[in-house]
Image (spheres, rainbow, N blue to C red):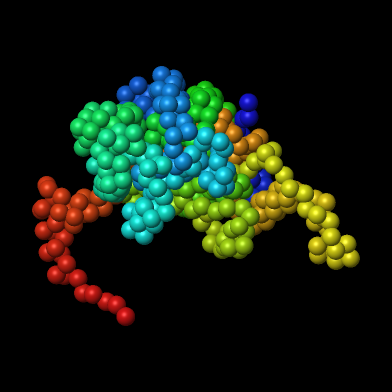
Amino acid sequence: MSRVRFDYTHVMSDLIGPEHGVTDSDLQVEAPHAGAALKSVLARREEDLRWLDLPYQTAVHDEILEYAASVKGRFKNVVVLGIGGSALGNIALHDALNGPFHNLNPPEGIPRLFVLDNIDAELIAGFLESFDVTETLFNVISKSGGTAETMSQFLIFREAILQKLGADALKDQMVITTDEKNGVLREIVGREGYRSFIVPDGVGGRFSVLSPVGLLPAALVGIDIKALCAGAAEMDERCRSTDILKNPALLHSSIQTLMHRDKDKNISVMFSYSHRLKSMADWYAQLLAESIGKRKSKEGKDIYTGPTPVRAVGVTDQHSQVQLYVEGTEDKWFTFLSVDEPDVNVTIPKAFDDLEGVSYLGGRTLTELFQAERDGTRIALAEAERPTATIHFDKVDAHAIGQLIFMLELSVAVMGEHYKVDAFDQPGVEAGKVAAYALMGRDGYEERRAEIESSKGDWKTREV
């Protein structure tokens, strides 16, 4: 089995200098705090952090696989209706494990996957115009069952199915993932008889990719969810140690904290040197931003904290962002995603032997060039005293992706203890939802709507 490794060589002061680098002494000082933070998180495993046990829910995995087998070959498309944590993990799994061109030519009997993670009318109208809903299975995902974006999509595509196929087809064309007992979507499941899967209590959206939220769409498009969860379970075992130098999640969370708190690196860049892993950086951006970006500490004090996540893709962003990274403000640290053994390779043909600017490429491979570009970027950053860590993959497979997901989820959970914030709430997001409910006229939000309307009188419009 492949093993994901966390390499922190290039964040250490002996390589990039003491101003921006971490010392062994720094890690030793941080170690007891990190160990205590890990114990605090793991103590909640059986209480309200049930996402920690998702890799071991074999009965749920079997139920998902049974359903996937029952609909295999019936649909050309699987469409996820969801947003945020219901969407980003699905996109990341699909891009990593099915590759960039799966939807152009999927394997026999395997559908294409589309994740409609927005409610822009042009996106939804365009899909309705371009796809036959009779050939499509819709997976509606909302833990609360009240997410306005997801429920709007549900109503639109439910109506499209009714118009094309009638009410009897709804149960065949839609599958629901939501709370076991509560919420309007669960009530609709009961009324209309949809097949449904459960988002367990203690599993927030951004920590839900190893629940039916991510596993069901993955299984429907041929991803090995057993291997995915086995990889997560392996990382879980590795991350139970309170020894900071033996636990990759603990080490990653501690370095993030040191970089931000002691080295003034308030921007965390995930730099994917694998096109298949580029969407993992999008998934991690939500995980980090929503979990750690908080106004209030656990004690209720205003602290306005949290690193800002940025996503970059090698080699694309060498030609758009690296100039800033090497010579710009010293407020960033970098985590590379790097694959040692890609599944495929392409040889560069020999030609133009008399032109040195081209001839040196002939006979080499794209993997050699890609890895040289990656190493060149890392060297340039190191010489500029910019700290970089690397998460190494032997290869990209389901087992390795499961390891990465669990490592980063646990790292962020532990960061919550370091930053002294609740890593599992999202009051800033909820404030925007409440305002939207009020503006849309939802019952129970009349007072908030009145507040918004009255405040508009104080606004002075400025535009050109």
Identity of the residue furthest to the front in this view: 165
Q: Could you tell me residue 58's position as x and y percent? A: 44, 20
Image vertical order of residue 81 relative to residue 181, above or below = below
Observer able to see residue 255: no
In the image, residue 32 sits, relative to residue 81, either above or below, namely above
Quarter of the image that includes the C terminus: bottom left
Q: Is residue 453 visible?
A: yes
Residue 418 coordinates in the image, percent (x, y): 42, 38
Percent position of residue 372, x then y: 73, 51
Instruction: Give the image location of residue 131, x and y in percent.
Output: 41, 50
Name which residue lies at 27% across and 40% down: 166
* Residue depicted at x 44% and y 52%: 308
Residue name at image x 85 percent, y 63 percent: 352
Q: Nearer the viewer, residue 343 or 230?
A: 343
Query: In the image, is 52 to the left or to the right of 6?
Result: left
Residue ID at (67%, 40%): 342
Residue reaching furthest to the top: 59
Q: In terms of depth relative to the viewer, which is nearer, 142 or 303? A: 142
Tell me the quarter of the picture where residue 88 sits. top left
Q: Choose top left, top right, bottom left or bottom right for residue 195.
A: top left
> Is 422 situated left or right of 231 in this image?
left
| Side (left or right) of 110 relative to 350 | left
Single out the residue that lies furthest toward the right: 354
